[in-house]
Image (spheres, grey):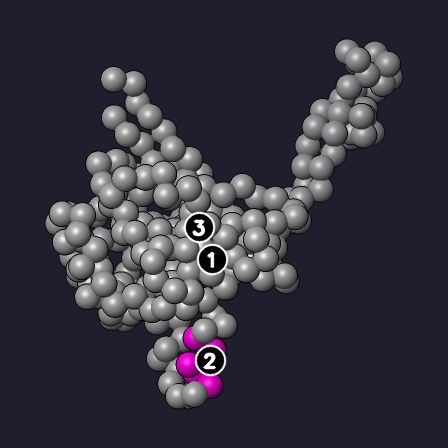
Amino acid sequence: MPRKLIDISMPLENDVISDPPPFGPKITYMDHETTFPQMAPFFPGLKKEDLPDGAAWAVEKVELITHNGTHLDAPYHFHPTMNKGQRAIGIDEVDLDWCFQPAVKLDFRHFSDGYVATARDVEAELTRIGHELRPLEIVVVNTRAGSRYGQDDYVSAGCGMGCEATLYLLERGIRVTGTDAWSWDAPFVYTAQKYAQTKDASLIWEGHKAGREIGYCHLEKLHNLEALPADGFMIACFPVKIRGASAGWTRAVAIFD
């Protein structure tokens, strides 16, 4: 049987809201007609009409933060330490073995925007799909946010994974998790409401902060998770190697034999 690949990454693009306004990508496109001045200095005496069809090259200038598009967060993003006091590793130090493993999908599309998933929710979904977690499996969460990509409410859509739910996975040997939402945690607008009422700062970024206890990575802004079954596939999500960075972009792919 031929191998089947499913792209579970979102594209980087200018005109789709995939981040809060100050943090979005900016891409400048330079086509074959406009780039002759870039090419000419390499070849003294070259004239534009000397080139086939007068066409130079196409190139793009991209302004990004490391968390634009589909990316893998390193433990350093979450906190200065991991594993109860060890120095948190950057994206260039992540074990590549973590990034190519059998995977399982939790379908949490029925949870409302802002809901914080618990360990009981994870356990119930694993029971429903008949899957027992194995160390190093990659666990991805399909939320309602996946259906809102390209819409103005994408950043505030989907449920989040709480500290309890995250530790449930980490304690069973999971080291890479993922979500099709903007953040592994619940959208900030909902957490801000809870914080305003309680002044309990432990609610802020609680899923990320689980990395203080057990170091792990997670994928954010995955795409097309509804096309995946519950299990029976691999995920490859090797990050771009950026020295000492908190995240790296990845072309995450689901692989079926």
Look at mark 3 in the image and give the residue it sits on.
Answer: 146
Residue at image point 19% right, 66% down: 120
SS at circle 3: helix
In the rendered view, does 135 fall on the left or right side of 70?
Answer: left
Please report whichever mark, 1 or 3, sits nearer to the chain's N-terminal start: 3
**How far is the residue under mark 2 from the one under mark 1?**
18 Å
Label 2 SS: helix
Where does label 2 land, which residue?
193
The answer to whether residue 3 is above or below residue 164 is above
Q: Which mark is residue 182?
A: 1
Comparing 249 with 163, the one in front is 163
Kind of residue indicated by mark 3? Gly
Q: Nearer the viewer, residue 234 or 209?
A: 234
Real-space Cα distance between discs 3 and 2? Answer: 23 Å
Q: Please give the range of residues in magenta.
A: 191-196
Side of 240 relative to 109 (left or right): right
Which of the two marks, 1 or 3, is nearer to us in this view? 3
Label ID, residue 134: none
**Which amino acid does the dot numbered 2 rest on?**
Gln
Q: Which amino acid type is shown beneath numbered disc 1?
A: Trp
